[in-house]
Amino acid sequence: MTSGRNPSINRRPIYILPKNFADYLCPQQNYYLFLDIDGTLADFTLNPKDSVIPTSTLILLQKIQSHGVKLAVVTGRSLAEARQMLSPLTLPIAATHGLEIAFDDISDHNETHVVSVDIMELAVIRKSIIQSCIPFDDFTVEDKPYSVALHFRKNPVLADAAYTIMVKALKTHANWTLKSGKCVWEVVPKGVDKGSAILTLLKRMQSSNSILPIFIGDDITDEAGFIAVQGENQIIVSQPQPLKGMGIKVGSEATHANYYVRNTHEVTMLLNSFLSFCQEHSMLAKETVRHVI
């Protein structure tokens, strides 16, 4: 349990040279780009509150959007935090691992919860976790509206102690489960994962069957998203046809994703290559229209 990794994942992904990402894309194909935040758009920090998405990255995403590409964020962050980090970008957000979904970031009536949340029960769980953490100095309890996370980024040696605390807190709460990530354990309602969130967003936003999804993420909680976009396993049984998208892992660890880049810097390079592809595609389309006229 110390690593927070899934021992059943043993596939090694193919490295994508970020500046050549356009070589993997087809001008005749429409793309839907799903992005994680922490460890993907923002660097991993000891305190989650210190993480920021660079302004240059937000501008890059806005430019990609301007070419008609659909974008969405799928994150473990709360919806409020994700909106703040992405501002002034406007796009769909699946927050708290897909528990909170906003189909845009400015209209509250577009928000939905994938599963019901017992707020009173969550308060009891949260209190138990906080009390158990009193003897330790290096834990950070992140209090979200519909979940609670225990970070041990300051001292990874506390991984097993963190796991023990979280298991104890859930001992009599059968409707809740633990999600592991990079130096974190998080309590969430059962039935929530990023793969289901991506499929929900696709169902709502997809205008044609020609849209191919791409998901970029770095953590074990992103594995369900990789499985979903690549059309693998039972997670997509509700889909009429398997999706054959691209899962791109940030980091070279074993993963369900078919591809990987090394770090957040390479994610930015990859997105720049994607923008160049979009710009070239747009120019070719304009030339085709001009010749037809």
Image (cartoon, helix red, strand yellow):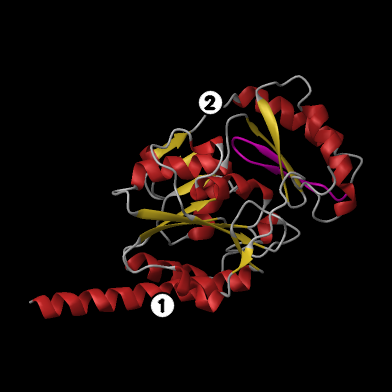
Of the two numbered discs 2 and 1 in the rendering, the one whose residue sits closer to the viewer: 1
**Local crowd at mark 1 within 10 Å, few (<14), some, or many (≥20)?**
some
Asked whether, in this view, residue 176 is left or right of residue 20, the answer is right
> Regarding mark 2 in the picture, which secondary structure is present there?
loop
Q: Residue at x 39, y 59 (%)?
A: 31
Give the crowd class for mark 2: few <14, some 14-19, many >=20 residues within 10 Å.
few
Q: Is residue 6 left or right of residue 237?
A: right
Residue 94: horizontal and vertical position, in percent?
50, 45
Q: Nearer the viewer, residue 124 or 289?
A: 289
Foreground of the two, 138 or 24: 24
Judged from this view, the residue extending furthest toward the left is 293
* Numbered label tally: 2
Residue 196 circle label: none
Q: Which residue is mark 2?
A: 116
Question: What x and y, as percent, mark residue 277?
Answer: 39, 74
- Quick one: label 2 or label 1, which is nearer the N terminus? 2
Type of amino acid under label 1:
Ser
Q: CA distance from mark 2 to mark 1?
A: 42 Å
Report the amino acid beneath label 2: Ser
Q: Quadrant of residue 65?
A: bottom left
| Residue beneath the point at 50% across and 72% down | 21
Depth order, front residue of 234/207: 234
Residue in view at x 68 percent, y 63 percent: 251
From the top left corner, tell me how far across and down residue 4 is, in percent: 78, 46
Residue indicated by mark 1: 276
* Magenta region, residue range: 137-151
* Secondary element at tag 1: helix
150 vs 72: above or below: above
Q: Where 283 falls versus 259 (above or below)? A: below
Quarter placement of the C terminus: bottom left
Residue 96 higher or lower than 217, as above or below: above
